[in-house]
Amino acid sequence: MPRTRNDLLIALTVGAIDVAACVATSLGRGQLRTEAGITLTVLGALCLLDRRRRALPVLGAVLAVQLAVGVITPMPDSFGATLAVALFTVIRQGPARTAVLACAATLGVSVVRTVQGSEPFWLRISANLAAIAIIAVAAVGTRTWQRQLDLNRRLLAERAVAEERRRIARELHDIVAHHITTMYLMSGGARATLDTDPGTAREALVTLEASGREALSEMRQLLGVLRSADQPEEEPPAPQPGVGDIERLVAEASAAGQPTELRISGEPRPLPLPVGLALYRVAQEALTNVRKHAGSARTRVRIAYAPDEVTVEVVDDGAGGTGASPGAGGGYGLLGMRERVSVHGGSLEAGSRART
């Protein structure tokens, strides 16, 4: 653990305090004794530079200095700022047994120094016990607070990672489910009409190709967002889709054999990019669900702008049959849509003739 500027600042501060106390209590005891006391006090303060790396040895050195200073220049009225900091560090960093031994050793040194005082012995012992108790309580409280702070930081980091995983899962689901469903249906339609209606089969293959190209483009956009900041990009990523791109979704759905119309009410306005992306993904997933479960049912997409909200509604007439699906859904689409809108304070309704 390297030394820091704070270590030096603490050592200089407590050293200055103890030197001032040493000078004040050495008046009238001779210049030689004063200089010796100041030298030892400075050496004790310098020991604090390594207190975070070697807390217990530093406390031992400080206690030895305190004994020497007490013999040369008695300071009966001073517990010692250097000793207080060294003891605080040991209690904060070490286990309970080490903390108890450190307190006992500190009390022992205090008792030896207390013998030289003029006040009643019990009074000076009580004062030192109170000082040790205050330091211990402060150190334990600081350690508990620091552990709780570290725990909160770890929980916040884990929560951020989990949220990022959910976001990536939503993006992957929306991209893959939408385009794979379209490609599945178009390839089936092309196969069914290849011999009887080559023109329709050709159109289905063109739509399939466009859907695959769009899927690759959106996957590249997602990977570009996930790329770490220290990797330079050759070109800026394409903008994320928004509400304005819902018209393209409607056109793609119609081209894929799902009659879809778009209606816009209210006064369109620019929306924050995350909100626009969420609305686009909700509409995309809703159209995918219609395609999976209602087949070629006629579908209406409505975007309603209100002063304080925007509503996206996707409704089908239920006349398209059961539809064709690559596999049974696991409910991740609805879950993803709810998560998207809830992040922005919105709500989702899904079901028979319900808003989505």
Image (cartoon, rainbow, N blue to C red):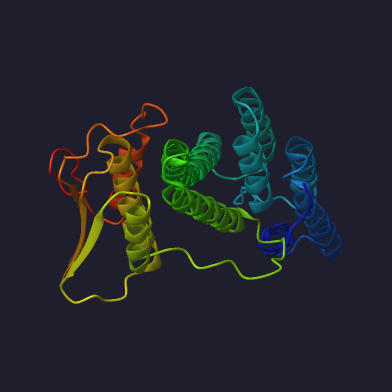
Residue 1 shown left or right of residue 343 in the figure:
right
Q: Is residue 118 above or below residue 237?
A: above
Furthest residue to the left?
Answer: 353
Q: Can residue 312 be seen in this view?
A: no
Which of the two residues, 342 or 157, is positioned nearer the viewer here?
A: 342
Residue lying furthest top:
97
Can the viewer see residue 99? yes
Residue 63 drawn above or below residue 210 = above
In depth, the one of 253 and 352 nearer the eye is: 253
- Determine whether, in the image, residue 231 is placed left or right of residue 173: right
Depicted 310 relative to depicted 209: above or below:
below
The image quadrant that residue 318 belongs to is top left
Q: In this view of the protein, which residue sits in the foreground, 36 or 323?
A: 323
Residue at the (54%, 39%) spot, across then down: 143
Residue for point 76% across, 44% down: 62
Q: In this view, does 329 lie to the left or right of 73?
A: left
Q: Position of residue 241 (x, y in %)?
A: 43, 63
Q: Residue at x 82, y 54 (%)?
A: 43
Rendered location of residue 245, percent (x, y): 37, 65
Report how many numbered discs are placed on residues in the image. Answer: 0
In which image quadrant can residue 26 be found? Answer: bottom right
The residue shown at (71%, 50%) is: 74
Tell me if residue 324 comes above or below residue 97 in the rendering. Answer: below
| Residue 98 in picture, x, y percent from top left | 66, 26
Q: Where is residue 99 in the image (x, y as percent from the top left)?
A: 62, 30
